[in-house]
Amino acid sequence: MAKAELTQIPVSQMVIGLTVKLPLSWTSHPFFRSKVKLEQQVQIEMIKGLDVDFVYVIDGHDLLPVIEAPIEIEQPQEELVQEVDYRPLAKKSMRLSQQRFVKSVNDSRTVFGKVVSDPEGTYREAATLVEDLVGHLYESETPHLTLVGSGDADKSVTQHGISVAVLAMMIAHTLQLSKTEVRDIALGSLFHDIGKLKVPEDIRRKRGELTDVEANFLKKHPNFGFDMLKRSGLFPDAMLDIVLHHHEFIDGSGFPDGLNEAKLLITTQVVSLANDYETLLSKYHTPQIALGILFKNHSSKHSDKLISVLVKILGIYPPGTIVRLTDDSIAKVMMTTADVKQPHVWSCDTSGGEPSFRFLISEDVQVKEVIKLDELSEGAVKTLQANNSISFYFNHFNH
């Protein structure tokens, strides 16, 4: 029997059950190989976010819809629009996000310092911080993520808490959870690692592998944090559940109680996913690689629906990703946009010269590929501040 020809379909026609081949090299997508069996909706969403308009169908042709012959429709001529330079507004918007992030981290640090000595003050100030975060999330209907940071290579517990809160709140917003649930998520995210303050610093900051004793001690931090906050009687149960169970996974492989999906609140599942991604980001330092590792190796730990939402929020090139553009310049993604292939970036040439903030959506330039830090020149590393830690905050600039 003659070998069947591959059928080319637009990405919009992909359905679960198909086996498709991506028209990309393996280095340009987060899958193990270019041949992909579509078993989860999140796989379809990931492919839609790639720089492809079509895929080849290898198997499952019977699942494809019958398409009538297309009717040619005359496309309306584009209206002439006066060009506006939105870069100053975008820069101002990102500066505001950075300022808000720094203030949130400082406020969180102040709150942490009062947990034992002033429980009521801790709760009152934490609730105020949460209201600030909630207010920033809902400033518009379509919040985006922007890159923020402290300028340091490592994140503090409070920086990590704010970034996890932002990611988790964005997921909750997309899922249309109630504002009460969003507040519980924000509060739980802020405090989820407070128990680590009872873990000796030499264990917390150890670069190499932990011994079994050290690892078991570190794994007690959810219990330490829960006990510390439960004692005051002020914090809501859903928030305390997040603190205790933010390392639990739906497949029962987490700790401290090995809970499965049926026993995990949706609010706790959201924070568990955001925290898992942030942890991978700290390990691999490249947002796109961390997202790929999460998708490939941790997909059984979180629901397909939640992973799909996270993928949509981050985009295929999350803020902080180092990329090569189609004009061969190097850039760091600064802010997500509606078009995942054309984010707002901080760009330079290969040697680190000619730095500039660029709106790719207003240029005939796209992301060509993700590159690793060790591929950059020293000048490019310095210009792009490529070694800095990566955190996220809300941004409502939509041009």
Image: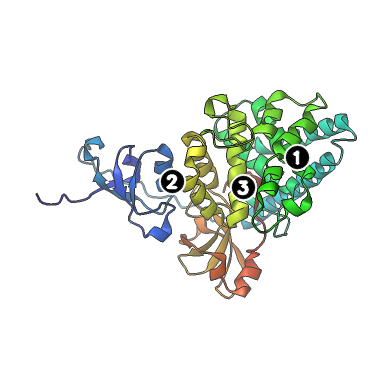
The percent coordinates of residue 283 (x first, y second) are: 60, 55
- Which amino acid, by three-letter code, is at mark 3? Glu
- Mark 1 is surrounded, within 10 Å at the Cα level, by few (under 14), some (14 to 19) or many (20 or more) other residues, namely many
Most extreme residue toward the left, as rendered? Answer: 1
- Which amino acid, by three-letter code, is at mark 1? Gly
Is residue 389 found left or right of 347 in the rendered image? right
Residue picked out by circle 3: 278
- The Cα–Cα distance between marks 2 and 1, rounded to whole angstroms, is 35 Å
Judged from the image, the secondary structure of the residue bearing numbered disc 1 is: helix
Residue at horizontal 57%, vertical 25%? 263
Residue picked out by circle 1: 195
Comparing 191 with 67, the one in front is: 191
Is residue 307 found left or right of 248 in the rendered image? left
Residue at horizontal 23%, vertical 38%? 67
Look at the picture and state if 372 lies above or below 17.
below
Residue at horizontal 60%, vertical 52%? 281
